Image (tube, rainbow, N blue to C red):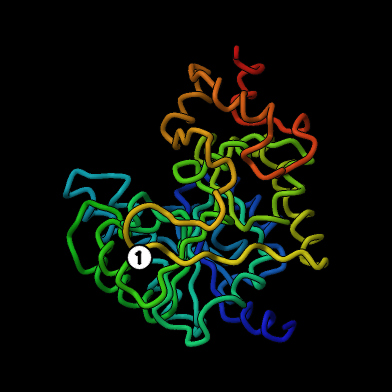
Amino acid sequence: MTRIIARKAAQVFIRIGSYNEETEWRRSLARTTYLHALAPRRDYIFVAQSASVRERREHGDLVCITSSLLLRCNSMNETKPCRSGLTFAFGLRWAHTNTNRSYILSVDDDGFLCTPQLPRLLAQLPAAGQGVVLGSWHKRLTRPDQQFVLLSRDVAEVVAARYLTTRTSTSAARHLASFLTGQAHPLDARRVVLHPDHSALAQWYQAPTKEAAAAFCARHLWIHFCCTRAGDAAQSKPTWRAMQAGAEMAARSDTKVEAFPPLERVGSFGWGTPLPCADMRITGCTKCKKAFSDCSMNGTVQARHLASNRSCGGELTPAASWNPWWLACGGAPET
């Protein structure tokens, strides 16, 4: 098994989608935590819309989208979905052209990847290594969310080619949803890939204590900090460092991250056991961003389940050690 895990780890290339000079601090934090043991351009690359010449020369791990592609978005009077799709597809094409890795993992820079745990999960992928689409899927299984998508090399090549040669203002995953869901191995990983739009448990990790952060990678692989946009360097550094320490510790132990359940093609997800926090309300990124900005959201439902700690599978014990996202507003809401 150890040999299989090591071999799988060497088959993955990581593409991190970023934005511009304003998000350099996120890239810097990633380099010192979950990317620190990886080699630029051999194991990973940042894809940004712009970056300083200094940063590009100093680290050698940045590629920028061509200006002609960005002008395409401007000509359609569109910004985020189009630019996000271009960053996604441009990175896939770069990885497919410049590496021979069997899998390409695309993540955003406002999240944390438990890199030492990645090989354990990759060892569970289909042996054929083709037709693989793995991520956290939107409701009714329409498409994976672009903030975390693992594609086999054959799928990545087609996605990049189709999106980069098509004029569309939507994201790549939305534009090519039917192609992605029609692959031989569409896998949903929402038990280990946490996104507030898909998992109430992800809301708990938006502002974790040091203890919660350190325990995260023993059970999970990725957390998307969309509610806080990863905060800022001062806020994020202790959390990311605690997560990295926990990931390295978990990788040295016998802890095994839970296997990916198969993707349900129709209806709702039919898990044998409920997802963690299954009876908590999923608020999604938009609402929890608002809660962080003006503390207007009523967290009564979350407070009630936090107190009982029944629906989250004992994610961390005792429950009192949690600091869920809504506590960042100065205390628990009235119950």
Q: Which quadrant of the rendered structure holds the N terminus?
A: bottom right
Q: Is residue 241 above or below residue 57?
A: above
* Residue assigned mark 1: 89
The structure residue drawn at horizontal position 56% and vertical position 73%, both measured from the top left corner, is: 41
SS of the residue under disc 1? helix
Residue 2 percent across, percent down from the top left:
75, 82
Is residue 34 something that shows in the picture?
yes
Residue 172 percent across, percent down from the top left:
30, 60
Residue furthest top as drawn:
334
Q: Nearer the viewer, residue 131 or 235?
A: 131
Q: Which quadrant of the rendered structure holds the C terminus?
A: top right
Residue 314 percent across, percent down from the top left:
72, 43
| Residue type beneath disc 1 | Ala
Q: Is residue 173 above or below residue 288?
A: below
Q: Nearer the viewer, residue 60 or 166?
A: 166
The structure residue drawn at horizontal position 78% and vertical position 61%, both measured from the top left corner, is: 250
The structure residue drawn at horizontal position 25% and vertical position 52%, both measured from the top left corner, is: 170
- In the rendered structure, the answer to whether residue 69 lies left or right of residue 121 reads left
Total of numbered circles in the picture? 1
